[in-house]
Image (cartoon, helix red, strand yellow):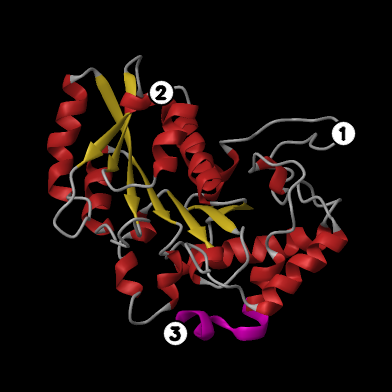
Amino acid sequence: MGHQVPGPLPMAALCDLVASFLNNGMAVYEMGPQGVAMERAVVKWMGSVVGFGPDCDGVITSGGSVGNLTAMLAMRRVKQDTLDGALPAVLVSDQAHYSVKRAVKIMGWGEDAAIAVPCDEEFRMRADALPETMKRAESAGRRVVCVVASACTTATGSHDRIAPIADFCAKHNLWLHVDAAHGGPAGLSEKYRHLLDGCDRADSVVFDAHKMMLMPALATGVIFRNGAHSFCAFDDRASYLIEKSPQEEWYNPGHRTMECTKRLLCLKVYAGLLCYGTKFFGN
């Protein structure tokens, strides 16, 4: 009971019942117009919680593992021209969630492409160790394109210090992804908001509502600071479903997600915010 995910708000659980009765697919506006409108609002709201501006965009998907994969696939698309034939590498905390390494393997980069950065005595990524770790990767013939920070780690609840990691990424033109599946809602708390300092400089963030916001599983936001990057992972066509470009159909979640028969995941979050307000979740 309450292992990893909490006992949910009863109202939020009832929203999943309603979503099941409606049974609206969410890949395109035509199939779930009310859900698409709510998801657009929830995505923008999540972006604001982690410090992103109005140009952010993303999608609600089924869990942090799928969210991390989605963000990493977008990163690969954006950074592929910087490789110049070199083998890619991603720097990750040795406390990072296993789904990050799994995403790297799914992308075909191999397990060795996820290079561990040592942590301090509080299990936080050592930003001062990033230059040496990057040098080690380059000596092995790899080109570092991304750093993944944790806010917070699943095993220890430790928040990486994101600001100095963001400084390093800016200096070396690296993609910064923040796995804030557990700790993203800290942005709602006056007491704990500082734990996300620097998150506003990330290129992508994963944010679970089914952990610290009392929502039934699953409800994960994958948010990109540059909204155009939200189309980079899954920009495909299907004559019966998705015919136009993302620029023409920017409102359709199908341009941003692996899922086609996509559940109405945003209803419980939207209703929870509407009924309880943000202060309730920030306390």
Label 2 near label 3: C-beta < 8 Å? no
Q: Which residue is mark 2?
A: 109
Q: Main secondary structure of the magenta part?
A: helix
Residue 137's quadrant in the figure?
Answer: top left
Looking at numbered disc 2 in the image, what kind of residue is underneath it?
Answer: Trp
User: Label 3 vs label 2: CA separation?
Assistant: 41 Å
Looking at this view, is 10 or 278 the one in front? Answer: 10
Image spot of residue 245 (x, y percent): 71, 36
Magenta residue span? 273-283
- Secondary structure at badge 2 equals loop
**Which amino acid does the dot numbered 1 rest on?**
Tyr
Query: Is 166 situated left or right of 206 in this image?
Result: left
Residue at far top of view: 85
Q: Residues within 10 Å of mark 3 (few under 14, many from 20)?
A: few
- The reply to whether dot 1 and dot 2 touch (C-beta < 8 Å) is no
Q: x, y (%) of residue 87?
A: 33, 19
Give the percent coordinates (x, y) of residue 186. Answer: 40, 71
Which one is earlier in the sequence, the residue at label 3 or at label 2? 2
The numbered mark at residue 240 is: 1
Residue 13 or residue 258, whichever sits in front: 13
Residue 281 counted in the magenta span? yes
* Vertical order, 217 against 89 (above or below): below
Q: Residue at x 44, y 34 (%)?
A: 102
Q: Amino acid at mark 3?
A: Asn
Q: Disc 3 marks which residue?
A: 283
- Where 22 sits versus 64, above or below? below
Tell me the residue at 22%/51% (across/down).
125
Number of residues whose C-alpha sits closer than 10 Å to that of mark 1, classed few (under 14), some (14–19) or many (20 or more): few
Cα–Cα gap, marks 1 and 2: 33 Å
